[in-house]
Image (tube, rainbow, N blue to C red):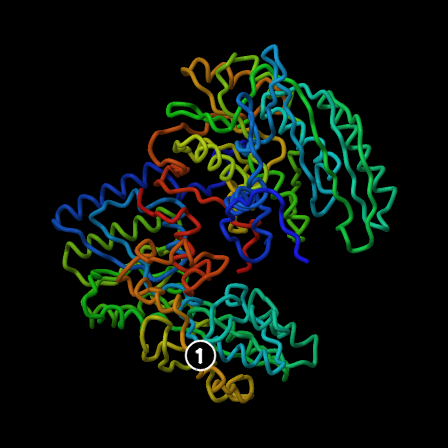
């Protein structure tokens, strides 16, 4: 007997083969897989708000009175599970809190947490992870309100998977698809810190410098930004997997605009810049876990006010205007290197240090 | 990018935008004095990397066409050379090689595919690491060596350092000067000057190009790899074209001398000799391959093992491979964006041609920086 889907068949774009690691790296391949397989056929019946078809960081569901519930979910896997500046526990809280914030909900009502553990996982480690989850919740002003726990056999899961779902409320959901030519692009701090810190541990690079992940809940920072310029923040995205390059590509692509970046304005520490150059990596491709890309509409005074608000916050000290939105180069990100201009490509697969 | 730490390093010395603009203007003045577009060729993946990374093609005036020639040793590794490595691996020899070499397509398969079928392949950073591998085992370890004269010196040094008896070399090393002759003599080429690679010249010395210049009456400028090095090299090259002065000029004097590194040259020529051979997609290049001298035959995989390539005779190149224009790209006749496969069927994950495999390959570099070099 063969089982078939009882629902009306939606013509599949005939993807052959299997899922590869590149499908999980946040770039174009992943977006294709999601669009062509995972979300295919789900009807999006929202007339207001933000639904599945928007491929945003979460959903915005209207609940009347001009209010929206924001829901977002994220499964966290990271190797190693403990790294300089954080661990998978802290990451699981920050990732979801930040996704809520990117949608405009900066005061999470609560989080759920599902844990999948591998047989043999040390309870001592679990306690450490749980402790850092509590700490991250405290920083974000939220808590875990319900959860689920599963244990799987050895080798059936790699140590631990943490899934968190967050719920928040906002009057003004913010999309990542509403940039217009003339908008200004701001990033809230230095880029590349998380990815490089992880890579250094993962590949045993033996670098004699202190590399620390930027993993942090930035809902407070985003709240300060939103309050400083009522309504002028028109788009937001956190540049996690795939880095600034993927985030900007996605925003530009969905908004049908081009983005012009000024390389000299992009904040990056000298250490990260040097390591990235040595390893043949682009800081623009490296993951961040405590940063946001913000699209602002309005004159220079609006931008200045927003920038001042960001810089007054401890997590936004290095915030900077890094570029602007243009009508040309639709779906592309153009980088002015000071010495010339080139396109920024989206990373394909995990960035790997150069072999030779 | 903006540094948030105090800038103390002098790393920006070669990345000064105002000097870059001044050099671009100098090129512009020279080419407008010439009154037409001129074409020059560089022969180095590292030059292309810098040009692409810093977006220099948007700065260099349109009247100077800079094309990349056969500057990627991995890309010009010929099919039978890959086949030899595959056969050795299938015979149970541990093949150690650079990561880039793994996915270079052979006639029937790449080393990566041989590995998937159970062959033992080790990725190493260089010949020395491959030799260490051999020291730690009784297995036969063969280093599949690729690279131009710069890298070949490192391979030579290892062979002169008393390698263990279970160690051998399968040399796919190439020698750049002869291919410049071939490209310069290709009918229909528009090349009026060469930008030579600074690191290779650091070994060979810039004097090596004097005979070439005399014979072909084409100027050669040796240049480094920082953006200003490249722009300054191109500016000087354009001037030499305008002056109608075929000469060698060294624009990388902080690293390159006329004589080069004598010690390295001695090691290179003690171990290797030149011989003719095919460069993938380009042509048969007389004296273009570096092979081990007789004194080192006991370390020469081609003499130590019987490598029977007859199994590959039945293979015809695939339809996609037949559309690949890597050869024309490396000869400077066409460019990646004019290839129908570029960025579609041919991507770094599943390369059709060798130019998409190596991080030194033109197609790979263009793809890495968005696929359109000219904005």
Q: Is residue A17 above or below residue B300?
A: above
Q: Is residue A61 above or below residue B152?
A: above
The residue carrying pointer 1 sits among few (fewer than 14), some (14 to 19) or many (20 or more) residues within 10 Å by Cα, namely few
Q: Which residue is at the front of the view, A307 or A232?
A: A232
Residue A254, percent from left and from top:
46, 33
Q: Residue furthest right?
A: A123
Q: Residue furthest top?
A: A65
Say left or right for B54 vs A61.
Answer: left
Q: Is residue A244 above or below residue B126?
A: above
Say left or right for A9 vs B61.
Answer: right
- The residue identified by callout 1 is B315
Q: Quadrant of the N terminus of chain A?
A: bottom right
Locate residue B188: give its quadrant.
bottom left
Q: Which residue is at the front of the view, B251 or A284?
A: A284
Question: At x 58% / y 24%, what residue is drawn?
Answer: A103
Q: Which residue is at the front of the view, B114 or B15?
A: B114
Residue A18, percent from left and from top:
59, 56
């Amino acid at each position: 007997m063969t089982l078939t889907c009882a629902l009306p068949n939606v013509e599949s774009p005939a993807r052959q083969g299997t899922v590869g690691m590149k499908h999980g790296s946040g770039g174009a391949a992943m977006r294709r897989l999601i669009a062509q397989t995972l979300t295919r056929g789900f009807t999006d019946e929202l007339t207001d708000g933000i639904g599945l078809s928007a491929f945003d960081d979460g959903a915005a569901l209207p609940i009347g009175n001009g209010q929206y519930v924001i829901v977002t979910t994220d499964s966290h896997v990271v190797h190693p599970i403990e790294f300089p500046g954080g661990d998978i526990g802290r990451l699981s809280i920050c990732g979801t809190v930040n996704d809520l914030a990117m949608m405009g909900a900066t005061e999470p009502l609560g989080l759920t947490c599902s844990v999948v553990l591998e047989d043999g996982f040390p309870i001592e480690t679990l306690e450490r992870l749980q402790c850092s989850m509590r700490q991250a919740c405290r920083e974000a002003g939220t808590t875990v309100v319900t959860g689920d726990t599963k244990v799987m056999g050895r080798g059936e899961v790699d140590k631990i998977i943490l899934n968190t779902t967050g719920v928040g409320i906002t009057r003004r959901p913010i999309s990542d698809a509403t940039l217009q030519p003339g908008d200004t692009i701001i990033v809230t701090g230095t880029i590349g810190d998380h990815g490089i810190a992880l890579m250094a541990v993962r590949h045993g690079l033996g670098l004699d410098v202190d590399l620390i992940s930027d993993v942090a809940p930035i809902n407070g920072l985003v709240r300060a930004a939103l309050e400083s310029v009522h309504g002028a923040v028109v788009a937001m995205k956190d540049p996690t997997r795939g880095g600034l390059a993927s985030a900007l590509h996605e925003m530009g692509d969905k908004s049908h605009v081009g983005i012009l970046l000024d390389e000299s304005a992009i904040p990056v520490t000298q250490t990260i810049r040097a390591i990235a150059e040595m390893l043949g990596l682009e800081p623009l491709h490296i993951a961040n876990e405590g940063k946001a890309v913000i699209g602002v509409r309005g004159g220079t005074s609006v931008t200045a006010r927003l920038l001042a608000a960001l810089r007054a916050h401890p997590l936004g000290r290095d915030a900077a205007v890094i570029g602007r939105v243009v009508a040309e180069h639709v779906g592309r990100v153009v980088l002015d290197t000071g010495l010339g201009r080139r396109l920024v490509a989206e990373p394909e697969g995990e960035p790997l240090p150069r072999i030779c | 990018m903006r540094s948030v730490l105090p800038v103390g390093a002098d790393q920006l010395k070669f990345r000064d935008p105002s000097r870059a603009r001044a050099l671009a203007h100098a090129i512009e003045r020279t080419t407008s004095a010439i009154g037409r577009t001129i074409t020059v060729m560089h022969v180095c993946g590292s030059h292309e990397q810098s040009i692409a990374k810093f977006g220099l093609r948007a700065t260099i005036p349109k009247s100077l066409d800079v094309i990349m020639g056969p500057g990627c040793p991995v890309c010009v590794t010929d099919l039978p050379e890959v086949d030899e490595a595959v056969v050795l691996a299938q015979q149970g020899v541990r093949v150690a090689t650079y990561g880039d070499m793994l996915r270079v397509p052979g006639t029937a398969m790449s080393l990566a595919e041989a590995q998937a079928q159970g062959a033992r392949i080790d990725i190493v950073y260089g010949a020395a690491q491959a030799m260490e591998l051999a020291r730690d085992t009784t297995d036969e370890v063969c280093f599949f060596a690729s690279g131009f004269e710069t890298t070949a010196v490192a391979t030579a040094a290892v062979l002169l350092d008393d390698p263990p008896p279970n160690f051998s070399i399968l040399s796919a090393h190439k020698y750049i000067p002869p291919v410049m002759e071939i490209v310069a003599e290709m009918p229909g080429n528009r090349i009026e000057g060469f930008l030579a690679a600074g690191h290779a010249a650091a070994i060979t010395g810039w004097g090596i190009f004097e005979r070439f210049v005399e014979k072909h009456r084409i100027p050669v400028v040796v240049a480094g790899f920082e953006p200003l090095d490249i722009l300054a090299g191109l500016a000087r090259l354009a001037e030499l074209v305008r002056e109608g002065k075929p000469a060698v000029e060294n624009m990388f004097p902080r690293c390159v001398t006329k004589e080069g590194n004598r010690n390295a040259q001695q090691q290179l020529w003690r171990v290797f000799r030149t011989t003719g051979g095919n460069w993938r997609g380009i042509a048969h290049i007389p004296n273009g391959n570096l092979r081990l001298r007789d004194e080192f035959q006991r370390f020469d995989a081609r003499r130590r093992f019987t490598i029977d390539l007859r199994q590959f005779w039945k293979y015809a190149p695939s339809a996609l491979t037949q559309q690949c224009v890597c050869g024309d790209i490396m000869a400077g006749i066409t460019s990646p964006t004019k290839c129908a496969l570029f960025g579609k069927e041919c991507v770094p994950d599943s390369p059709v041609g060798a130019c998409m495999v190596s991080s030194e390959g033109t197609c790979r570099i263009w793809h890495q920086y968005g696929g359109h070099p000219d904005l």
